[in-house]
Image (cartoon, rainbow, N blue to C red):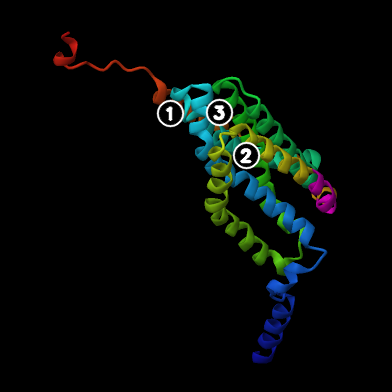
């Protein structure tokens, strides 16, 4: 009995993947895919803090101080919706192509914001940009299993998690450089250029993952998505709603 259990345990142990070292992450065959996935998460996460840095310059140029919260709200709301649609888009186009499409959408939204003549167009551009960013972030985690061997999964997931910490430094730093010289439009152009490079790299580095991971299209939770949109829109509208405030009697006298 003891021998049988020992043999079974040994067999089970043999089936477990050998832990990888950090040095294996530097293997040339993994670097392109790893750079694409890390770049996608970084591009998405840094743009929240980047916008917060250049937003005063945008308001000074275009006005619309009452809508200051909307560019960030639209970006985050759209990214949430994109994350819920990731399964559907992956099933239709494959993860690799869907990731590249997310980068293209992200860049298109950034370009629209860079050309904005009013705060309303900035909000629209951020909404489009957020959808692409949500795809990049969600698909980065989905693609780990289809791109890397199982022994590397913990290391890759750890690197993806560390990107969110780097964002705290990179986002304000990049935005601050453009805000310092008053070129807030240039910040969006630079982001769009990076997204274009990422889209091209994704088509090559993630081609294998895109070909082998298609499955039947899942249902999109439309009702839940509509509720999320409604709640976020209600909070944003409440922030700009005109509420009458009584003036002190001393101020009403002339």
Callout 3 secondary element: helix
Percent x, y of residue 115: 66, 25
Q: CA distance from mark 3 to mark 2?
A: 11 Å
Per the image, the residue denoted by label 2 is 84
Query: Residue 226 has which mark?
Result: 3
Contact between marks 2 and 1 (CB within 8 A): the answer is: no
Between disc 2 and disc 1, whose residue precedes? 2
Question: Is tag 3's residue or tag 2's residue first in the polypeptide sequence?
Answer: 2
Task: Write the start and end of the magenta stretch as one range.
Answer: 200-209
Helix, strand or loop status at disc 1: helix
Pointer 2: residues within 10 angstroms few (<14), some, or many (20+)?
some
Which circle marks residue 235 in the picture?
A: 1
- Residue lying at the far front in this picture: please name it: 181
101 vs 9, nearest the viewer: 101
x then y, percent, for residue 21: 69, 75
Residue 223 quadrant: top right
Q: Residues within 10 Å of mark 1 (few under 14, many from 20)?
A: few
Q: Residue at x 79, y 48 (%)?
A: 202
- State the CA–CA distance, disc 2 to disc 1: 21 Å
Residue drawn where x is 45% and y is 24% of the image: 65
Pick the quarter of the image with the C terminus: top left
In terms of secondary structure, where does tag 2 sit? helix
Which of the labelled discs sits on residue 199, or is there none? Answer: none
For discs 1 and 3, the disc positioned in front in the rendered view = 1
Above/below status of 103 relative to 206: above
């Amino acid at each position: 009995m003891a021998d049988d259990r020992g043999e079974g345990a040994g067999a089970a142990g043999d089936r477990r993947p050998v832990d990888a070292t950090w040095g294996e992450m530097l293997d040339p065959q993994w670097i392109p895919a790893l750079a694409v996935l890390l770049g996608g998460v970084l591009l998405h996460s840094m743009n929240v803090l980047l916008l917060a840095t250049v937003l005063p310059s945008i308001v000074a140029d275009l006005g619309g101080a009452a809508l200051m919260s909307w560019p960030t709200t639209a970006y985050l709301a759209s990214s949430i919706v994109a994350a819920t649609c990731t399964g559907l888009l992956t099933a239709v186009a494959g993860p690799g192509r869907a990731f590249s499409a997310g980068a293209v959408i992200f860049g298109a939204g950034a370009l629209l914001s860079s050309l904005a003549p009013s705060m309303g167009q900035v909000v629209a551009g951020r909404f489009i940009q957020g959808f692409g960013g949500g795809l990049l972030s969600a698909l980065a985690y989905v693609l780990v299993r289809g791109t890397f061997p199982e022994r590397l999964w913990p290391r890759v997931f750890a690197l993806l998690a560390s990107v969110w910490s780097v964002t705290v430094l990179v986002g304000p730093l990049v935005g601050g450089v453009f805000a310092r010289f008053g070129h807030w439009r240039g910040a969006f152009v630079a982001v769009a250029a990076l997204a274009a490079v990422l889209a091209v790299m994704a088509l090559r580095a993630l081609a294998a993952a895109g070909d082998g991971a298609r499955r039947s299209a899942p249902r999109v939770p439309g009702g839940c998505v509509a509720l999320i949109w409604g709640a976020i829109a209600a909070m944003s509208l409440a922030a700009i709603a005109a509420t009458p405030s009584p003036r002190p009697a001393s101020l009403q006298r002339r």
